[in-house]
Amino acid sequence: MIKNIPVPGIEEYEKGFWEAALESKLVVQHCHDCDQPRFPPRPMCPQCHCLEYTWNQVSGEGEIWSFVVPRPPLLPVFEEISPYAVGLVSIKEYPLIRMIGRLKFNNEQNEDNFEEIIIGSEVQVSFQKISEEICLPYWVMG
Ligand SMILES: [Zn+2]
């Protein structure tokens, strides 16, 4: 039985993302040679096959591209917090890059008002520390 939030194993080429997240910073991997941004992090540029990369911090602003409210059956750790919304968010600086994360209202009283979630709404990233190595990005609606 999986009781905690399943966390990813962190590969070498992903470390920059997770290290920045520990400092509450959102970064996007860029190719060292052609500067193409990519997400999720990968070891090789899909455009020019360069194996070197850099990390550029972004504002953490984005907009809701899509979302879902997961329904049971869920893992116990998610069952405890259900219902909740998960968003697919376009990053402001790179709209073709979309990141998944929990969607939260900035006002706790609206926590279950999923009909108020509007595609295209602006969101701001925040981070939840779930282990010594992992801070999970999530998205706060205005
Ligand atoms: Zn490249």
Image (cartoon, helix red, strand yellow):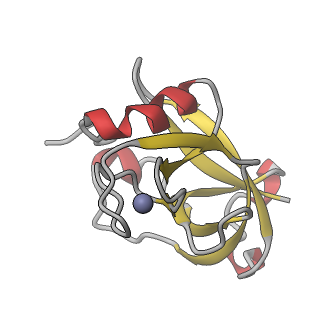
Q: Can I make out residue 4 in this image?
A: no
Quadrant of the rendering where the C terminus is positioned: bottom right
User: Going by the picture, which residue comes out furthest to the front?
Assistant: 33
Residue at 54% over, 56% down: 35
The image quadrant of residue 118 is bottom right
Quadrant of the rendering where the N terminus is positioned: top left
- Left or right, 130 with reference to 123: left
In front: 2, or 62? 62
Q: Can I make out residue 56 in this image?
A: yes
- Left or right, 111 with reference to 121: left
Residue at 28% over, 66% down: 73
Residue 108 x %, y %: 78, 49
Residue 22 x %, y %: 54, 25
Residue 125 x %, y %: 69, 48
Residue 25 x %, y %: 65, 34
Residue at 47% over, 47% down: 32
Position of residue 135 relative to residue 126, above or below, is above
- Left or right, 36 with reference to 71: right
In front: 115, or 35? 35
Q: In which quadrant of this rendering is ligand 1 seen?
A: bottom left
Position of residue 98 relative to residue 132, above or below, is below
Label count reads: 0
Position of residue 124 relative to residue 48, above or below, is above
In front: 2, or 48? 48
User: Going by the picture, which residue comes out furthest to the top?
Assistant: 132
- Left or right, 4 with reference to 26: left
